[in-house]
Image (cartoon, grey):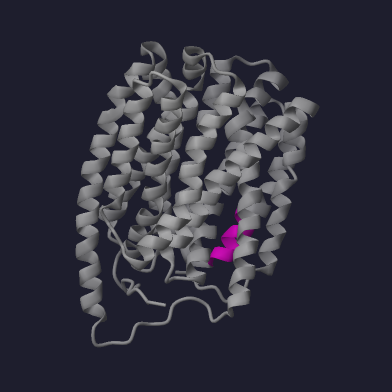
Amino acid sequence: MTSVPIASPATRPLMPVLAALSVAHLLNDVIQSMIPAIYPLIKDAYQLDFTQIGLITLAFQVTSSLLQPLLGLITDKKPWPYAMVAGMFSSLLGLLGLAFAISYGMVLVSAALVGLGSAVFHPEATRMARHAAAGQQGLAQGVFQIGGHAGYALGPLLAAVVVVPHGQSSLAWLSAIALCAMVLMSWTATRYIALRREQAAAAQGRPIDAVGPNLSRGQIIAAMAILIVLLFSKNAYTASFTSYYTFFLIERFGITVQLSQVMLFVYLVVGAVGVIIGGIVGDRIGRDKVIWLSILGTLPFALLLPHANLVWTGVLSVIISLIISSAFSAILIYAIDLVPHRVGLVGGLFYGLAFGLGGVAAAGLGLLADRIGIVEVFTLCAWLPMFGLFTFLLPKAAPRG
């Protein structure tokens, strides 16, 4: 297994590169989040039923989730910094295809192209962020992921302002986002190539420090399995908010759709803040402690939320978002520290799982809500953070950076 030299922790993180990756992440996720946001338009335009809508999600998720680990493994063996540009070109084609689709089949292909762009982006961008971190992996992942959270929150708003009033063809206007992202990714890739050369030159003549815990293969596999369980509990609970929070608010309090959307937007924006805070804290106290706090620490607030009034529901949702949003970066960095020679594979696997598990959880919660009601679903989901107790089983020797 080939070791990759990482910048010394004594140096400072390359903030211009991290900032560029964060903005690229924002632009990428704006495009990704546009697909579910335009489902009502597509459903009416092509006279689709909910099963056909679900197939659009499947086409997007299959390419976005399942291909990420494979692409990460390939680029681990032969890094391709400009892969992000090619991936964004795929998203651009998918965006234009959605804008001018003349059939349902073309919609499916276009959604798959957008998913492919996301599958290419995340593994390579994760590797770049790690190399630019200079030992402060939590800060680097926090900066990188805050762009994704912001993009995910902005996508539906952009769809409401641009696409809904002007129709499906107005998606073509958003191709400017993809073009800007391609330019930014080209600069980032060029800077990353130079950074790797500098690090390789600095590593010549001295042994590369061992990175990663001294664990057996079986222990690493067991730790990875625990991390996946933790990720599922986090994403399943988060899916209850991202997919059904507005329905919960409307049914429980009888508020307007607009107010419920504003409260969802606040929840998503606060999550972006939690990501960067969790990353910085993780650099100081360790990833396992952040996982403890971010998942299990959500439990008391989650249990209170289904029984609170409207004002306290808003307050509790903000607290929950702030705490639980730091979980993913801590889980991802912990996993990469277990196998630091497979950054692309681990990044692709966990980003893919984040998409896939979230989609599976959302579908399952939807079926459950049809049977028992959305308020009862939130009451049951409040116990999901209990899975944070599995953090106790993680190896204690995992490094912090």
Say which of 19 and 239 sits in front: 239
Camera-nearest residue between 103 and 96? 103
Would residue 176 appear left or right of 160 to someone viewing this image?
left
User: Residue 298, how many percent across, how many down?
Assistant: 66, 48
Tell me where residue 86 appears, x and y as whole percent: 28, 46
Q: Is residue 53 left or right of residue 388?
A: left
Query: What's the residue at 56%, 45% (across, down)?
Result: 356
Q: Is residue 78 above or below residue 386?
A: below
Across and down, in percent, residue 168 comes to 38, 17
Residue 282: x and y in percent read 50, 62
| Main SS of residues in magenta | helix
The region drawn magenta spans 286-294
Q: From the viewer's perspective, tell me whether residue 166 is left or right of residue 51.
A: left
Question: Can residue 305 be seen?
Answer: yes
Seen from the viewer's position, the closer of residues 9 and 106 is 106
Q: Quadrant of residue 176?
A: top left
